[in-house]
Image (cartoon, rainbow, N blue to C red):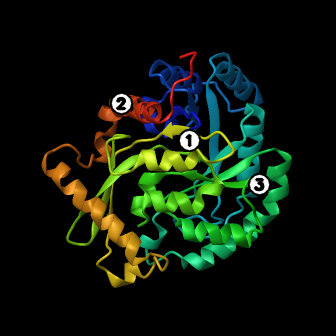
Amino acid sequence: MKPFRVGIDSYSLKPLELSPFETLDWAQRQGGAGVQFTEVHLRDGQQLDDALLKDVAAYAAERGLYIEWGGGQHIPFDTTTWQTRDIFPINQRAARQAHTLGTSVVRSCSGGLMRWSDEAPPTEALLRAMARTLRPQKPMLTDLGVVLALELHFEFTTFELLRLFDMCDAEPDGCFGICLDPMNLLTMLESPVAATERILPWIVATHAKDGALRLTESGFESFTVEAGCGSVNFPAILRRLATLNRPINLSVEDHGGSFDIPIFDPTFLSRFPDLTAAELSALLKLARAAQGRLAAGEIAPLARAEWPRHCERRVRNGIVNIKRIVAEMVPPTSAE
């Protein structure tokens, strides 16, 4: 088994409004090995320029911490109005920042929950528009040595992103990749383990985020759970990630909130044409297994408004839990 470095995603600590340096310090104090920067909170007078980025890179390097970057986009629309927008300068800026930081990963996330809305374009139309937009960005990303890591968010399934990569004439180990988020897979009606297997060659980064499903009158409700305490089978996922020929960091992400998944609505369910009976059955089993834990009060949805009171404890515990799972799978070296 390959060792994994366990760190955090800065979005988890958004309520604390920490500077990049403070975020790295917080992660290290909790035993974390680095930070994937989704949120960057700047102090008065600070600018996210090359000088600051080089200082952050040096600060992390002195402490042996990894850095992964964010700010990428892959949907060429404003997802509130569905007006087109040019995402090339957005991705070029994020890629140049990552290059300055000395990291090769730029996480990309453009919104989410499109198929929950009747106003959004059809998924296949979005995929075609994305392919037209992303293909010309390949030389820029390649020249900067950066991988645009599309997060498995509430946007597209692994089936659909594989079609996107094909439309972009892309191959694994190139300038496009995946940021694996297993809790988001539950919300997108995918089994986390099966989806990991589907998209495995493309994974370059992770959000080690946990969650669970429960049955409701409209179908499912997905919700976040402290990392390592939910329905995500992290040992099975890590065994698959360990087969990759690249190091994969496990960036713990957590937040409040829950998501209604109205699978009893035939129109909604038709928007997931790749969903199989086998995978839906696996999700139903996960929901059934969570019922007893919900009844016992072991897990429960946490309102987003409550997250600021819980964020430090949950993320701290998440680091401990994921490190324990890794330690149980990876034998210690003789030096340890």
- Residue type highlighted by circle 3: Gly
Where is residue 46, by image quadrant?
top right
Q: Residue at x 62, y 78 (%)?
A: 125
Where is residue 226, by image quadrant?
top left
Q: CA distance from mark 2 to mark 1?
A: 20 Å
Q: Is 114 positioned to the left or the right of 148 in the image? A: left
- Which residue was labeled with disc 1? 38
Q: Which mark is residue 317?
A: 2
Q: Nearer the viewer, residue 66 or 88?
A: 66
Q: 10 Å neighbourhood of mark 3: few (<14), some, or many (≥20)?
A: some
Q: Nearer the viewer, residue 234 or 299?
A: 234
- Which residue was labeled with disc 3? 174
Q: Mark 2 or mark 3, which has the lower sequence index?
A: 3
Q: Is 100 positioned to the left or the right of 322 in the image? A: right
Q: Residue at x 75, y 25 (%)?
A: 51
Expressed as whole percent of the image width and height from the top left, the position of residue 320 reads 40, 29
Q: CA distance from mark 3 to mark 1?
A: 22 Å
Q: Nearer the viewer, mark 2 or mark 1?
A: 2
Q: Which mark is residue 129?
A: none
Pointer 3 with pointer 1, Cβ within 8 A: no
